Image (tube, rainbow, N blue to C red):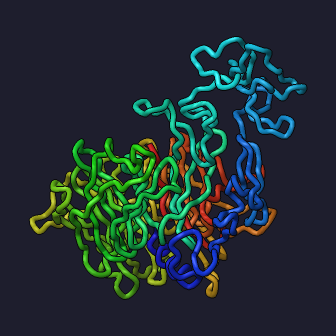
Amino acid sequence: MDKRGWLLTLGVLGLLAGVALTGCLQTSSLVCVGGTVECNVTCVYLNSDPANCGACGNACQPRAVCVPIEDGGSGQCECQKGEALPDGGTTILQCNGTCTDITTDPKNCGGCAGGGGAVCGSGQVCAPNDAGGGVCQTSCGTAVDCNGACVTLSTDPNNCGACGNACAQGYGCHPTPNGPTQGACLPDAVVACIATPGKVAPIFDSPVQPLAGPAVPGGNVPGGLGLLGDALLVGAEGALGELALRNLALVAPETLPLGGGPDFVEVDSRSQNVSYVYVVDGNSNTLSIFSGPPAAAATVFMPDGGLQGLGLAVNGGYAFGPNSVPEPYARVGNDIFVPLYGGLPPTQAAGGTVVRLNLNQPYAPVLVGTYDLKGVLLPTFDGGASDPRPSQALFHGGYVYVVLNNLTPSYQPAGPSVLVKIDPAQPLSDAGVGSISQVVTLDAGVCLDAVSVAEAGGRLLVGCFGQVQYDPSTFATLSVDHSGVLLLDTNDALLSAWSPQCPDAGPACTPPIAGTLAVVDGRAYVGDQSSGRLFVLDIGQTQLTQVVGYGADGGVPLQPCPPGLSSVSDILSVP
């Protein structure tokens, strides 16, 4: 995440809640924090928990989800959105008070019974037809008959791998060609939340209605996510945790020590014999390296159904130096290009550099060279000086792209953001110094303070923090300008720009700040840095189009993180 957001959030949350390690703090009695309430000796979010939606014990029925309502602190059960039909209808309807899929329900096949649908007769099943609805017939053909419903066990979230095995909210059904069943419930993405306390949340990237599942404890200040086998790795303050990907509430007993500010996790699982986990820590200014089993053998599940550790072990590291603040890096083969952001003034001079490390020996980084960014002429609005603050690197189109914030010492935009391009094939000098190939200046009219980049089908997405004003006493976001996402073509020219906006009418809305980016199934997922929301964009050939967010149709963003003072620190796309 952006280093200013990291430092600000750490300070604010420290003032509000100290160090909270789980969703519920245990003293002489249960104390729920971070917007949770106690339900049956458990702390839950009433605005997203389908088992306690709006009130303790109010469980949503199958094919229904728990969504926030206007007050932000509560929720209500609603039928999932279904696939659109040619006649303007949808495949998910409420029939006699029950959410049902009319393409497979034998009691409401093709529509609600008595309202255009049919009740299939004895010996008949309900199967999807070519028109997108349902039809009664005598056989399921290549599909599976689950109590009269013709389903595909490898993709049906209500019958995933076996009849009646419904995936929880936030998880979709995915084929498992080498697994014990045809399908398994897995998230399409996972979001890390910096809040009180830290959380992680599953995301189901349904083409009709992307859904966030209930957030679960993710350690104190989770900043980076990785994937090894069936385990989600969570780099949090002080420890690297291991969660079961198919149920993030299940935590393996193994934890590995980390520094105080991990914000990037990379898993190198190219070898068939061993995997390496690299964690960048901006607080301790280090790269921690762990070795473990190959991805094919990495599992947190024991044969009897219990949980075990992956068997990771500390196996090396690298120290970048005091106040260097390393950021998410780019990998080119066995070389990594690590941006150094620099500390708070007056220690920012320790940054402004990209360090190139060689990992031919994966556990023993070797310094190859450096790229000095201080010589890059940053355009400023008033002609004054600006410090280069590199926040992320990405290998794209044959170049290493490095994002420079272009900020004043008080962390306000000093001028247009720039992208620095490094050609990794260009030789270094005898002293190990590399040169900058190109500098791309971004349009200040649509983007200030660029902080993140992501690959998007040969094009480039750039996330822009914008110019933000905070309440000096509460640190609440008051206003945001020039924040959003840019879509650049293969020549780095601007194709499209999008900005998150509050609705024109309705309840009060904390202005959103675009920060962390990820591409999930061809869509852009944009994490909010001011109130833990998630926006989803369709990436067209030349246009970004909002799929999930505030809109004239009454739509709202996903809320994977606790509402209020929270931020999305990382988004991991699950293959």
Q: What residue do we see at 82% from left, 38% from top?
A: 94
- Residue 228 position, x and y percent, is 36, 50
Which residue occupies the foreground of this view, 466 or 155? 155
Which residue occupies the foreground of this view, 184 or 15? 184
Q: What residue do we see at 67% from left, 54% from top?
A: 549
- Residue 103 position, x and y percent, is 72, 26
Would you identify the image quadrant in which residue 177 lies?
Answer: top left
- Residue 237 position, x and y percent, is 42, 72
- Residue located farthest toward the front when viewing the structure as drawn: 304
Q: Is residue 503 left or right of residue 304?
A: right
Would you identify the image quadrant in which residue 508 lies?
Answer: bottom right
- Residue located farthest toward the left when viewing the structure as drawn: 430
- Residue 429 position, x and y percent, is 13, 64
Q: Is residue 117 left or right of residue 151?
A: right
Would you identify the image quadrant in which residue 527 lies?
Answer: bottom right
Q: Residue 436, can we see it?
A: no
**546 over 260 or under it: above or below:** above
Q: What residue do we see at 70% from left, 64% from top?
A: 39
**362 over 322 or under it: above or below:** above
Q: Quadrant of the C terminus?
A: top left
Q: Is residue 396 left or right of residue 45?
A: left
Q: What residue do we see at 78% from left, 66% from top?
A: 71
Which residue occupies the foreground of this view, 117 or 522? 117
Q: Is residue 574 left or right of residue 171?
A: left
Q: Residue 406, can we see it?
A: yes
**116 over 504 or under it: above or below:** above
